Amino acid sequence: MALRYVPTMARKRKSALEQGALFLVDAEDPAVVWGREIDGHVAGLDEAGRGPLAGPVVAACVVLPTPLPASLMALNDSKKLDEAAREALAPIIEAEALAFGVAFAEADAIDATNILRASLQAMADALAACEVMLGRPITAALLDGNQKAPLPVHVQQRTLIGGDALSRPIMAASILAKVGRDRRMVQEHARYPVYGFDGHKGYGTPAHMKALAEHGPSPIHRYSFAPVKAAAQAKTPSSVEAKSAVGFIADADLLTGGRRDVPVSELP
């Protein structure tokens, strides 16, 4: 039987758990089909945050029970859900999943390798954390996209392009990764409020680009990304000096009276 989809019911206002243009029905989820073949569970892996100019890339790994609980029937691609819907689903996923793991690859790791390698390594780290929670090795994993991750040799892995819209374990992973990253960027906003991380979450919006031009990059910016590199070079003679200066602002409570939005020009 092929995958079959049905549209959601049209309403003036949809609840958080009702959002999304399409819902997967029947048991022909690729992860479920593969799970029947191996007589076991298949983990879903996805990441969030490859595109932003700042902050970590975050990956998640989720093993869901079969049959799927009714509370998870609203799972969908995280990009098709608004923030309220993702926040509503995240604790349900954590409560209903057999196991889950979330891993962060920080900006310095991204700069040291590249965003693709950092993303795939984060997937491997998320799977390792999921195995700890599960209490046994994961033997099969379905990854969103077309790139395999550096998973242990005991894990069979398959890639699925558009998997975050086709397979519920991947949908669940995409939601946990996105929610985890968004929460982290709100925390970073408290440290570096001049950039507005709580709004754009590190993406290159006009407001973010304006803040980069005015203040230079912060320590959590990705210096290997061209707009950040350009902003660092324009602000100071070297990106290293820019990184150190902004880092100094972030932690100089004694000089700023606890304020964390003080520009370099106002430091004593």
Image (cartoon, rainbow, N blue to C red):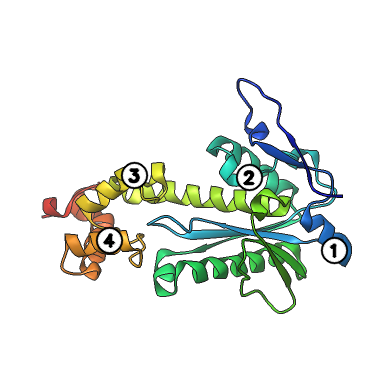
Q: Residue type at mark 2: give it.
A: Ala
Work out how far the residue at label 4 is from the one at label 2, CA to CA, in angstroms: 32 Å
| Proximity of marks 3 and 1: CB atoms separated by less than 8 Å | no
Q: Nearer the viewer, mark 4 or mark 3?
A: 3
**Residue placed most toward the observer, 252 or 206:** 206
Q: Residue furthest top?
A: 12
Q: Residue type at mark 4: give it.
A: Gly
Work out how far the residue at label 1 is from the one at label 2, CA to CA, in angstroms: 24 Å
Residue underneath mark 4: 247
| Disc on the earlier residue, 4 or 3 | 3
Q: Residue furthest front?
A: 2
Name the secondary structure under disc 4.
helix
**Picture quadrant where residue 173 is located:** bottom right
Residue underneath mark 2: 90
Q: In the image, what residue occupies the spot 71% across and 53% down?
A: 169
| Disc on the earlier residue, 3 or 1 | 1
Say the numbered circle drawn on residue 40: 1
Work out how far the residue at label 4 is from the one at label 1, CA to CA, in angstroms: 48 Å
Residue underneath mark 3: 196
Quadrant the C terminus occupies: bottom left
| Disc on the earlier residue, 4 or 1 | 1
Work out how far the residue at label 2 is from the one at label 3, CA to CA, in angstroms: 24 Å
Q: In the image, what residue occupies the spot 57% across and 60% down?
A: 59
